[in-house]
Image (tube, helix red, strand yellow):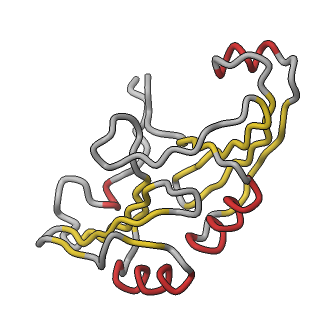
């Protein structure tokens, strides 16, 4: 039985820089990491790459884990997807005051499409992290909406 989301993963050209940004900008903490060298057939099969090598770090913020990879082989290519492009397109971080977080992160150098806007239920803004990945800041104003932050909890296995 699938019980929920454990983590998402991103690839970066500079693991140390990425981890530093996510710790300082968003408050993530490091909770595990490692590396593998070329010739690891088990991992090559798992990731679908031949002769791969990488370092990785698992980060955690609340109930969200983000696994970050820096591949030394093969080297990745920089992409800057648009919101309309197919595939995983953004990470959404919940905050209590989206306007305060927007101001704080802007001062740290994060670039946003614009200031937070919203509706009766939510306030949000979209920006880019240090690698150009889209990051949404979300504040839910109406916790009674169907996707309120406090409603997201792990499902218990059914008997």
Q: Where 119 falls versus 9 (above or below)?
A: below
From this view, report whether residue 18 is shown above or below residue 21: above
Question: Is residue 4 positioned above or below 74 on the image?
Answer: below
Q: Residue furthest left?
A: 120
Residue found 52% across the figure and 86% down from its top: 107
Of the 4 image quadrants, the one containing the C terminus is top left
- The location of residue 34, given as percent across then percent down, is 83, 41
Residue 110, compared with residue 42, is above or below; it is below
Where is residue 87? Give x, y as percent: 39, 35
- State the image coordinates of residue 114 (x, y, percent, origin top left): 30, 75
Q: Is residue 81 left or right of residue 58?
A: left
Q: Position of residue 61 (x, y in %)?
A: 57, 60
Q: Quadrant of residue 46?
A: top right
Q: Residue at x 24, y 72 (%)?
A: 123
Q: Which quadrant holds residue 126?
A: bottom left
Q: Is residue 107 left or right of residue 72?
A: left
Tell me which residue sits at (24%, 54%) in the image: 147
What residue sits 79% from the left and 37% below the top? 72
Which quadrant of the view contains residue 99?
bottom left
Quadrant (top left/top right/bottom left/bottom right) for the N terminus = top left
Compare residues 77 and 154 and report the one nearer the observer: 77
């Amino acid at each position: 039985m699938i019980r929920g989301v454990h983590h998402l993963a991103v690839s970066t050209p500079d693991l140390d820089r990425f981890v530093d940004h996510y710790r300082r900008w968003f408050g993530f903490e490091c909770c595990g990491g490692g590396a593998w060298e070329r010739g690891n057939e088990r991992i090559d099969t798992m990731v679908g790459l031949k002769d791969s090598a990488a370092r990785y770090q698992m980060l955690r913020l609340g109930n969200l884990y983000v696994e970050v990879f820096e591949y030394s082989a093969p080297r990745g290519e920089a992409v800057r997807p648009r919101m309309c492009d197919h595939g995983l397109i953004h990470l959404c971080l919940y905050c209590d005051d989206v306007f305060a977080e927007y101001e704080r992160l802007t001062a740290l150098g994060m670039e946003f499409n614009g200031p937070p806007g919203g509706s009766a239920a939510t306030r949000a803004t979209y920006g880019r992290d240090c690698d150009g990945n889209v990051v949404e800041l979300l504040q839910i104003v109406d916790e009674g909406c169907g996707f309120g932050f406090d409603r997201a909890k792990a499902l218990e296995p059914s008997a």
